[in-house]
Image (cartoon, grey):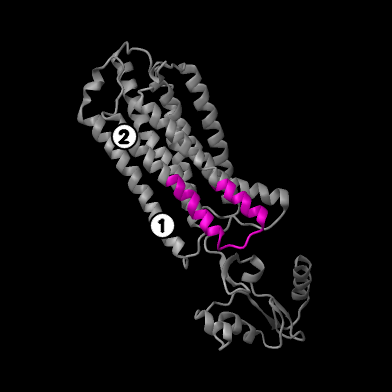
Amino acid sequence: MSLSSVEVSTEANRVFSIILLILAGLTTVARIYIRYQNRRLWWDDCWAVLTFSMLALMVAAYFFTDIKLLPTSAKTRKLQIAQSWIFVLGYSFGSWCGRMSLLLSIIRLIPPIFTLRRVSEHAFIFFCVMCISLAISKVYICASDLGWYSWPHPLCNMGNKAAIAIAELATAVVGDLTLVFIPIRLLSFIGLPTKKRRMLILLFSANMITSIISIFHAVFLSASAWSLLTIVNTAEPGSALIMANATVLAPYIYRIIRREGDFDSKPYTYYRSVQEDGSIRMRRVSDLTRSNIRFNSAVPPVSLLGTSENAEESLANLSGTSSGENGKDAGIKFQASFATLSTLDPSPASLENTKNTRAKI
């Protein structure tokens, strides 16, 4: 039995697409709420909303008319033609918008000083080019010969299906591998506990599910298995969106369960931490170290690195401005990574704030 002979009922397609849309919608709403509540809305959230819009349009197209039935009127034929165009373009735009949302979620965590940041930005441009190129090629193939408008089942057969299938599969696999490589490379520069590191690696590696769906899409397209293809058309954009949303929801749930610090960072809130072996790791700048805390003038200046009679000298040594041996070997001037605790005349309000701050520490 060939794949083209396999039939999936219209009702099954509609039920599956509705369930997928609900899951994608709930995760998208939760993502936007979390980001808005923490004042961290960024461009990746816009692309997530755009992906959900494309998915919703494709699901709505299922209810225009039953694409398997012969058109009984001019209106029905026009609706089936509209369905065909929505499925052809919605698949490409939805899948790649989901990938771009995930890529931007990764980019926002990479400090501008990293070469990996520029590599990721170039990857985003590559994603945009691939999305537009695939969409234009499909439009050209389907619009160059509109004879399929008069077919019993008006459906664009994509001309040379094998070439389109190979192109879509190749670009999808490259894109998904990029979305796995970049975060794993980033994690090698960031000091995280082993459990967090494993969770994030597993989270980003789960994006390969989208590649598996892309393989099925290529097989079904080459075999003209249109009934099965309609399921995959919504499954891939939906899975790409859910994976992108998971990168926001999983850290949030992890923080609630473990009650630990935040590693779904605002853009660029990292500092360079020099390790004992001379390597550099990026660590998050907490709200405490980003704000200057002032204590009683009777207390000598203290650095968060430890008690010191000369905090400025400690910061200078850390920044590499001194002539220390490590500074010469590294040949790099590092910025100060910690705030200095300066002094201020005591007052009841400041003393109360000091007590609260010490309690938090």
- Mark 1 closeness class: few <14, some 14–19, many ≥20 residues within 10 Å: some
Provide residue 59's location: percent of width, then percent of height: 45, 28
Q: Quadrant of residue 324?
A: bottom right
> Residue drawn 28% across and 14% down?
152
> Residue drawn 61% across and 66% down?
285
* Disc number placed over residue 252 in the picture, else none: none
* Disc number placed over residue 164 in the picture, else none: 2
Image quadrant holding the N terminus, namely top left
Provide residue 154's location: percent of width, then percent of height: 30, 20
Rendered position, 75 above or below 156: above
Rendered position, 98 above or below 319: above
| Foreground of the two, 165 or 86 | 165
Task: Please tell me whether mark 1 sits on a helix, a strand or a loop.
Answer: helix
Provide residue 52's location: percent of width, then percent of height: 47, 38
- Three-letter code for the amino acid on which mark 2 is drawn: Ile
Q: Earlier in the sequence, mark 2 or mark 1?
A: 1
Image quadrant holding the C terminus, namely bottom right
- Mark 2 closeness class: few <14, some 14–19, many ≥20 residues within 10 Å: some
| Foreground of the two, 266 or 314 | 314
Report if residue 172 lies within the magenta region: no
Provide residue 344's location: percent of width, then percent of height: 70, 82
In the image, taking residue 94 as reference, residue 343 lies left or right, namely right
The residue to which callout 1 is attached is: 121
User: How many angstroms separate mark 2 from mark 1 (CA)?
Assistant: 27 Å
The answer to whether any part of residue 253 appears in the image is yes
Q: Quadrant of residue 274?
A: bottom right
Which range is magenta? Answer: 175-204
